[in-house]
Amino acid sequence: MEILEDLSMLPVPWRYVQSWNCVVCGLCCKDYDVVLDFPEWMKIINAYGVELTRPGISCFFLKQKGDGTCVFLYNFYGRWLCSLQERMKPIACKLWPFKVTDKPKYGRPVEARYKCGERDLYVYVDPLCPGLRWGIPDSGFMSETLAEFVDLAIGMRHKQFFSTSR
């Protein structure tokens, strides 16, 4: 039974998502280790100090509060917001709940395949995100939101519009 529960939490291919909108629930900022690359880590420690990050074996992470939430998450009149949003939000945070990979890391390659020029990428979503609407992908989701997540993942874009709360 425990194994089946773990399998049900695997990321799901994007083709099962009708649309996605951030509902500013803060779930993405709780109980997830946010990996920082070296330039992201440097920006954060230069602005806020090293004490808001923690080292890993081969990378750095954002520190978490005692309740498991990110140190940069704050509540603003019932909405959970990121204080790094405009200036230096890490790419791992920008991409959540989407995962873009070069290989079908989580299975179901046909449903996860996303054609990016001549390149095949594999796009999955974390099924725990309450902003997901399940079904056949609508055209706005595919042309705006999904395309933006892929562009962010491959470094073609840095600013968010469709892939964040509005």
Image (spheres, grey):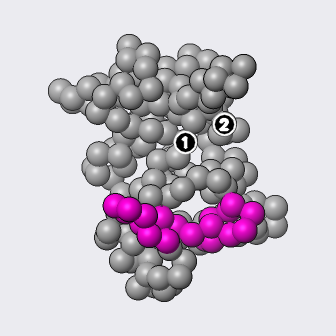
Determine if the magenta segment contains residue 57.
yes
Q: Quadrant of residue 65?
A: bottom right
Q: Which residue is painted at 36% across and 58% down in the image?
A: 158
- In the displayed structure, 35 sits above or below 64; it is above
Q: Which residue is painted at 55% across and 42% down in the image?
A: 97
Region in magenta: 54-72
Q: Which residue is painted at 66% across and 36% down in the image?
A: 128
- Helix, strand or loop at label 1? It is loop
Residue 142 appears in the rendering: no
Q: Residues within 10 Å of mark 1 (few under 14, many from 20)?
A: many
Quarter of the picture holding the N terminus: top right
Residue type, label 2: Leu
- In the displayed structure, 124 sits above or below 65; it is above
Q: Which residue is mark 2?
A: 128
The image position of residue 21, as x and y in percent, is: 62, 41
The extreme left residue here reads 118
The image position of residue 160, as x and y in percent, is: 46, 54
